[in-house]
Amino acid sequence: MRLYCATTNSGKLREFIQIVGDVHVLPDLKDIAAPEETGVTFEENAVLKAIYYSRFCDDPLFVDDSGLEVDALDGAPGVYSARFAGPDATDEENNRLVIEKMRGETNRRARFVCVVALAAKGELLKTFRGEVEGELLDEPRGSNGFGYDPLFFYPPFGHSFGEVSADQKMQVSHRGKALRAMRAYVDQEMRNI
């Protein structure tokens, strides 16, 4: 059995490989029209994408849907994290918009959320959720990671996710937690398929 993923995000792919190990990107992914992400939760979008993309291969496939939830912004950017500043926004543009919206705000609580959905041949097998709590900085710190990592301060480290190594981040990150849970499930429940 091979395990496939469907992502065009190189940062996510690095993290998938780091935690799961032998992961194959769905062949011809760039030629497959992406489904519209109509869900209002990370779970809904992850399930929608996993079921859709799993129809294009014979082995199990997983996708993640993840993002940043900011308490002072009523949970935004949430499911719109990757496109908060617009459909083709860069990480820098998304970060800038969050900084602008948080200017003068004293409640800096935020969390990263990740839901990994595992499917096979158009059927959902299971979902796995991971979260990590932190605070938003006034400006980016560090050049590691991707997305909102330089803005996300993790108090136990005393640093932003952008300032720590990939290994350090993945020990506690939302994606690391969800992927480890999925890997354990695959190892225990699916290796003989």
Image (cartoon, helix red, strand yellow):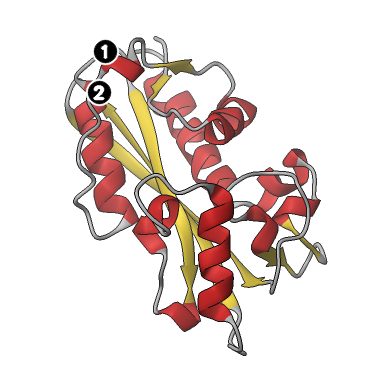
In the rendered structure, the answer to whether residue 159 lies left or right of residue 95 reads: right
**Residue 57 badge:** 1
**Residue 154 badge:** none
Question: Type of residue at label 1?
Answer: Cys
Q: Nearer the viewer, residue 47 or 98?
A: 98
In the depicted structure, whether residue 8 falls above or below residue 71: above
How far across and how far down the image is residue 175, in percent? 54, 45
In the rendered structure, the answer to whether residue 30 lies left or right of residue 175 reads: left
How far across and how far down the image is residue 77, in percent? 42, 65
Spatial CA span between label 1 and label 2: 6 Å
Identify the residue under disc 2.
Answer: 54
Q: Residue at image x 55%, y 39%?
A: 180
Q: Residue at image x 41%, y 11%?
A: 2
Give the structural element (helix, strand or loop) at label 2: helix
Quarter containing the C terminus: top left
Give the structural element (helix, strand or loop) at label 1: loop
- Mark 1 crowd level (few <14, some 14–19, many ≥20, 10 Å Cα): some
Quarter containing the N terminus: top left
Question: Type of residue at label 2?
Answer: Ser
In the rendered structure, the answer to whether residue 176 lies left or right of residue 50 reads: right
Q: Is residue 179 visible?
A: yes
Q: Residue at image x 50%, y 31%?
A: 183
In the depicted structure, whether residue 44 falls above or below residue 153: above
Q: Nearer the viewer, residue 122 or 125?
A: 122
